[in-house]
Image (cartoon, rainbow, N blue to C red):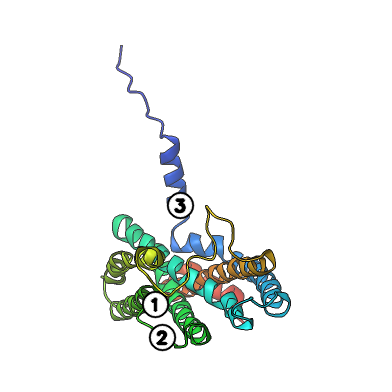
Amino acid sequence: MPNITPVSTPSIWQRIWQGFLMTVGTKQFFAIFSPWVKWLSLLSLIFLSIGSIWGLAFAPPDYLQGNSYRIIFIHVPSASLALSIYFAMAILGVIYLVWRIKTANLVAQALAPIGFILCVISLMTGSIWAKPTWGTYWVWDARLTSMLILAFLYAGVMALFAAFEQTSNRGKAAAILSIVGAVNLPIIKYSVNWWNTLHQGATFSVTEAPKMSADMWVPLLFMIIGSYLLVAALAIYRTNTLILRRDQAKAWVKEYVRQHFAR
């Protein structure tokens, strides 16, 4: 009687991983996420409109800072996103270096300028807020200094993407810097707890109730959600642009261009 070798059935995790790999190619990413841009943009417009009008026009003045605190509706979302985007870039860097998924590198390249701009906005709004609160635009506070270092890390990642754009090592150095630079993120996050700093603690906490009244923190939450939705839309749009540029010689891109741009 002949030996019958049983056919191994892939586990559920293997099937999930195989399904994931089928969606991360540049063509698949473009096809799946392109429709998301308009919906994410629309949702972000709704949330940002509600949050900004509520926060700037209807939220009450702070009992200590008066109306100067209203810059929080720009400062907090930009600072939160600056940290989140760099963390995402570090994760994408690991994915690119370990599994060689080129789309991860393109998403990181798309995110880097967005994160840099938001980091600069965070520093600028923080300085403007610091003047009436601390009496000076800048102090070498642990939170401010580590945030400034983050801006330089963003600039370094963008420079590496540009320097290696035409080589086979494109993005590898940028991925390494993103991963190494991620050590700065917990320093930014916990600096106000580890050292005696002028910067206030977190506005929101999972374990504690908000330190602001609801008519202040609810519009701030709208601004944060709207900002994240806007960045998601921008990241997809910029990634798709990079994909079209990278794969411009491929048949599917030529067909896409013919269908959408041919007169």
Q: Secondary structure at mark 3?
A: loop
Q: Which residue is mark 3?
A: 22
Q: Whole-percent x and y of residue 195?
A: 35, 67
**Residue shown at 61% from the left, 79% from the top:** 70
Q: Secondary structure at mark 1?
A: helix
**In the image, is 133 to the left or to the right of 214?**
left
> How far apart in space, not on screen, are marks 1 and 3 (Cα)?
42 Å
Quadrant in which the N terminus appears: top left
Amino acid bearing label 3: Met
Relative height, residue 183 to residue 140 (above, below): above
Amino acid bearing label 1: Leu
Callout 1 environment at 10 Å: few (<14), some (14 to 19), or many (20+)?
A: many
Q: Nearer the viewer, residue 168 or 132?
A: 132
Q: Which residue is mark 1?
A: 144
Callout 3 environment at 10 Å: few (<14), some (14 to 19), or many (20+)?
A: few
**Residue shown at 36% from the left, 23% from the top:** 6
Observer-side mark, 2 or 3, equals: 2
> How far apart in space, not on screen, are marks 1 and 2 (Cα)?
8 Å
Tell me if label 1 and label 2 are in contact, CB under 8 Å.
yes
Q: Which residue is mark 2?
A: 138
Q: Nearer the viewer, residue 5 or 144?
A: 144
Which badge, 2 or 3, is on the more N-terminal residue?
Answer: 3
Q: Name the residue furthest right.
A: 58
Relative height, residue 210 to residue 258 (above, below): above
